[in-house]
Amino acid sequence: MCGRFTLCKPGDELAGIFDLVESPAIAPRFNIAPTQPAPIIRQTSNMVGRRLEALRWGLIPAWAKDPAIGSRMINARAETVSSKPSFRAAFRKRRCLVISDGFYEWQTVDPAHSGSRPRKQPHYIHLRDGRPFAMAGLWEHWEGTDGTIIESCTIITTRPNEVVAPLHDRMPVILGATDYDKWLDPDNKKLDELQSLLEPCATGEMDAYPVSTRVNSPANDSPDCIAR
């Protein structure tokens, strides 16, 4: 799964990499957690060009009676995203890029002493060259009976590559730049082609290293979260 991630790069760098129409004014985030605003790029019929927006992380299906369901929908499995009721409509029409420059996973570590409880060691996973990347995502528009409107998103995960496999059995889908347009296009109905994009990132492009358990708390959001 993907339960925490970062976006530390400045807005002007993001604008150049993702061809945004303007440089977003955003503060660096070192520990983005579920239910918090997540940086995404999407395309709709009334949008001109790409813009970075913030949607609540944890997808709330349009049919949901209670937005609390979103806390259980932070990830969508690539293998079932086109058929599962919670995600299939969004997969067909509301795809997005979730922008990041790294994510965390926790590895269960055997205790040093017999009888001790196992502990979980967090690791920070990123591209070797440090550049930001786009995770495949979906977004939804939800309206409550009281008029409340929430726009939310989820991150699609797939099987891990060799970097992530020792840490977890899932990893986010990282899309290549040449696939951004076809993924974002709401009129693209080539579902088999879209499904084929949901593969692990090449092992040689990624790196991981252990970090402090400070990242375990969403209250900690500072550069020391990604310190080796």
Image (spheres, rainbow, N blue to C red):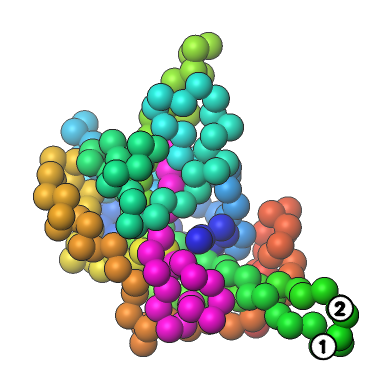
Residue 85 inside the magenta-drawn segment? no
Query: Seen from this angle, which residue lies furthest front?
Result: 115
Point out the stretch of residues depicted in magenta: 151-171
Q: Quadrant of residue 129?
A: bottom left
Residue 168 inside the magenta-drawn segment? yes
Please tell me whether residue 105 is drawn above or below residue 136 in the rendered image.
Answer: below
Q: Secondary structure at mark 2?
A: loop
Q: Which residue type carries mark 1? A: Ala
Can the viewer see residue 149?
A: no
Q: Which quadrant does the C terminus fall into?
A: bottom right
Task: Tell me if 118 is positioned left or right of 178 in this view.
Answer: right
Residue 116: numbered disc: 2
Determine the residue positioned at 58% across, 69% down: 105
Residue 158: x, y in percent?
38, 64
Residue, disc 1: 112
Q: Assess whether mark 1 and mark 2 are in contact (beta carbons under 8 angstroms).
A: yes
Determine the residue positioned at 73% across, 53% down: 219
Residue 9: x, y in percent?
47, 65
